[in-house]
Amino acid sequence: MFRERNPTTGEGYIEVQAVQSGNEAEGKNRELTFNKANVVSRRHTYPVYHCNYSGETTQTTSYDIGDGSLLCVLPDATVCYKDANFNQTQVVQMRPSSNLVLLDWMLSGRLALDEFWAFKRYKNSIEVYVSDELIIKDCTDLADTPQLTVSQGMRHFHVYGTLFVLGAGLQFLAEHLLGIYARKKNYNDAHDQDLIVSISPTQYTVNGDLISGCYLRFLASDMKNAAKVIQEITSPLIEILGGDPFERKL
């Protein structure tokens, strides 16, 4: 069981589920074996409330992935309520033979209450280390400015997400996503106005070991469009994880 400390309460913990899956999985034209495969998910969206006296809600999560192991962090979306001030840090320690799928995504707010990017601030930092060497530091900082509000900048989009895929055992997933979202479009091709996806292949060398994968970001106008991306991420993993973490959720 992974536990995320929530300093807002001082002593409380937010628990997320870590389910061990089968050690070996067979897919089409491939056979994958991991020493251990875990999936970390939440049972529902993660709400962030506003604090009294303009306080900040902070959350730090650390993951340590062993040799030849797979960790899939596939939570439900974070929802920052009106006037919330959220600062999240996620730190991943890997080995050269480790494998990681890390999804981080958020919703614009409680739409039933007409909350549309109405939080005070959302700050998220993701750090990934391989053999104690920092290879990824990704930061998102959303807050209104005198020139532009978050709501204005996001226009009609209600969902924002990022994804990291790393490890030799996950090249099939990286290639799957790159094959879908990295394809060049012709000038006259119609563009989806409700879903924007950008993706890049990634390669890092640590002590002579090559760690490769991909980095994906998306903006969606609603959950229906966001679900298209989430399902492309999870469907190739179902055989390995023994099920879909988002089944009956999207």
Image (spheres, helix red, strand yellow):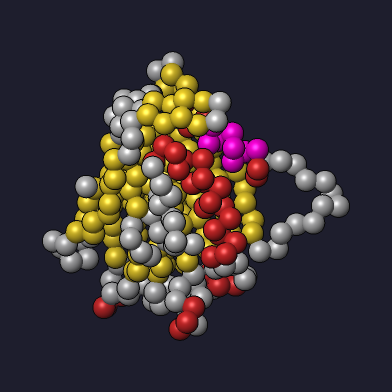
The secondary structure that most of the magenta stretch takes on is helix
Where is 33 relative to 81, above or below?
A: above
Q: What is the quadrant of residue 136 in the picture?
A: top left
In the image, is 139 to the left or to the right of 179?
left
In the current view of this chain or complex, which residue is farthest to the right? 188
Q: Residue at x 53, y 36 (%)?
A: 173
- Specify start and end residues of the magenta stretch as a single range: 172-179
Q: In this rendered view, identify the residue nearer to me: 89 or 55.
A: 89
Q: Residue at x 33, y 48 (%)?
A: 40
Is 54 in the magenta? no
Is 177 in the magenta? yes
Tell me residue 209's x, y (percent): 43, 19
Q: What is the quadrant of residue 179 in the picture?
A: top right
In the image, is 237 to the left or to the right of 98?
right
Q: Residue at x 44, y 26 (%)?
A: 32
Tell me residue 82's x, y (percent): 41, 77
Q: Residue at x 62, y 51 (%)?
A: 197
Tell me residue 216's x, y (percent): 55, 45
